[in-house]
Amino acid sequence: MYQAPEQLVAFNKANLEVAARFAGVALQGAERIFDLQIKAAKAAFADSVEGAKALAAVKDLQQLAALKDNLAQPSIEKATAYAREVYDVTAATQAEISKLVEEQIAEFNKQLIATLDKMVKTAPAGSEVGIAALKSAIAAVNSTYDNLSKVAKQFAEVSQSNFEAVAKQAVAGTKKAKKA
């Protein structure tokens, strides 16, 4: 099947736009992670300075023991919150990329079916059965992809709920340890 130069130019332009969209999503995700890292580094530095000041003000062992507990709890909570934010950004970026992939697969399937329909018009008599079988195979592959996509989404949801449960337990465990 011969494609005119205009078709090839349009195809290349569309592929360039898709690549730019993928790169944009990846860069936005990287930028959000970088922002989180900068904020976490600033907060850690500020906490270190406050901890050093508090440590310098300690006058006996009881104050030192109390200070240890007071410094540990916020650190664990901040680390858990940071991990949750990184996970959220990563999950959001992955969801955006998955959406782009799904759009591209849908567009590819649409173009493939259109091409097959054009082939049917110019194909010799009797080839309709073969093309129908090809269309059926494409539909089966699409159905399999849809099922795998649903399973992946369910896995992501379960992973997120497990992550949140572990984070809550970690914070609750440190609070219990502090009380004891």
Image (tube, grey):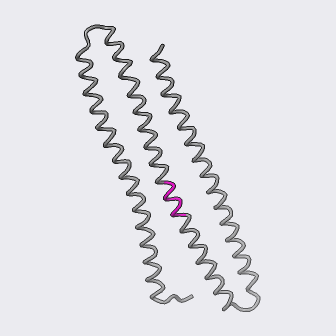
Q: Does the magenta-highlighted stretch encompass residue 97?
A: yes
The quarter holding residue 127 reads bottom right
Is 76 situated above or below 128? above
Q: Quadrant of the N terminus?
A: bottom right
Is 6 situated above or below 20? below
Relative placement, left or right, of 173 versus 23 is right
Relative placement, left or right, of 56 versus 19 is left
Q: Does the magenta-highlighted stretch encompass residue 105?
A: no
Relative placement, left or right, of 95 versus 40 is right
Where residue 60 appears, as percent x and y from the top left, is: 28, 7
The residue range painted magenta reads 94-101
Q: How many marks?
A: 0
Where residue 179 appears, as percent x and y from the top left, is: 47, 15
Where residue 35 appears, as percent x and y from the top left, is: 34, 47
Where residue 32 appears, as percent x and y from the top left, is: 38, 50
Q: Residue at x 42, y 30 (%)?
A: 77
The quarter holding residue 23 reads bottom left
Q: Main secondary structure of the magenta part?
A: helix
